[in-house]
Image: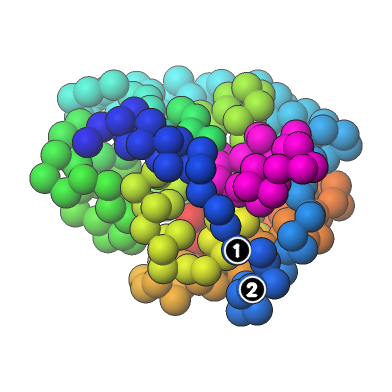
Amino acid sequence: MTDSEAAADYARAEAWTDYPEAGDRPSLTLVKPGQWVPSGGARRALNVVAAAILLILTVPVFVAIAILIKLTSPGPALYRQTRIGRDRRYGRARSHDPRRRHDLGGMPFTIYKFRTMGVEAERGTGAVWASKDDPRVTPIGRVLRLYRLDELPQLCNVLAGDMNVVGPRPERPEIVARLRREIPGYQQRHRALPGITGRAQIILQYDASLEDVRLKVRHDLEYIRTASVWEDARIMGKTVPVMLFRQGAR
């Protein structure tokens, strides 16, 4: 199944899916049922300005990375993939329609990354998590992942309105469907715009188990509960040593 087909199936399923109230799952009840993170205002302005400045400053880096990728492996320098983003229906749900009011399914969007694997890397595996020492990753791809440089094209996603610089990391439709079944409250992450970096990414290491993912979800929900301009600025600042000194995880 292609990314577009998976996204279409996910969207059809999400359109009529009811979710439990946050209070039904005390292990992950960091977000109140009526709470959501607005995309406008000062937080959004900070994220857009930061993305624009970074995009301008990293133009030479973009060019250098694109050339290196083209010289070291066949295929395009950029990689497009369907991810699940914010549920844009949440803030506009009709008050008399509880099904829509509590529908937290995110909407698919196209994310951009520098390609770090071979063109046919997923032909035999489908959508799977990339591990720290994934054999599918190219030599230049390992360097890009090590310093998080493969995520730079997502600055364009921020300017397009699909993402923020700071927010929960977006996942692929197939992976979201699995995690929603295995982690109660996982869908609450879609109450905020996804981000390039986040609280979980500056604190935790690579996912090695489902419990690692559960812990990241806790950090994501805590971020949504306490989101502010100052918190976004703090996370942006802490992302720099994560990139330079390889602390934390993706």
Residue at (77% x, 43% y) in the render: 96
Whether residue 164 is visible here, answered yes or no, is no
- How far apart are labels 1 and 2 at the CA level? 6 Å
Q: Position of residue 188 (x, y in %)?
A: 62, 56
The x and y percentages for residue 221 are 67, 62
Please indicate whether residue 182 sits to the left or right of residue 242 in the image.
left
- Residue, x 41% and y 68% (percent of image)? 182
- The residue singled out by tag 1 in the image is 20
- Relative to 31, does residue 96 appear above or below in the rendering? above
Residue 15 located left or right of residue 104 = left
Between 228 and 29, the one nearer to me in the picture: 29
Q: Badges 1 and 2: C-beta atoms under 8 Å apart?
A: yes
Kind of residue sitting beneath label 1: Pro
- Amino acid tagged 2: Asp
Q: Kindly give the residue lying farthest to the left in the view shown.
A: 124
Q: Relative to the observer, which residue lies in front, 154 or 10?
A: 10
According to the image, label 2 marks what residue? 24
Residue 87 in magenta stretch = yes
Main SS of the magenta part reads loop
Q: Which residues are magenta?
A: 85-106
Residue at far bottom of view: 27
Q: Residues within 10 Å of mark 2 (few under 14, many from 20)?
A: few
Image coords of residue 80 (percent x, y): 38, 28
Q: Is residue 246 left or right of residue 198?
A: left
Q: Is residue 90 magenta?
A: yes
> Element at badge 1?
loop
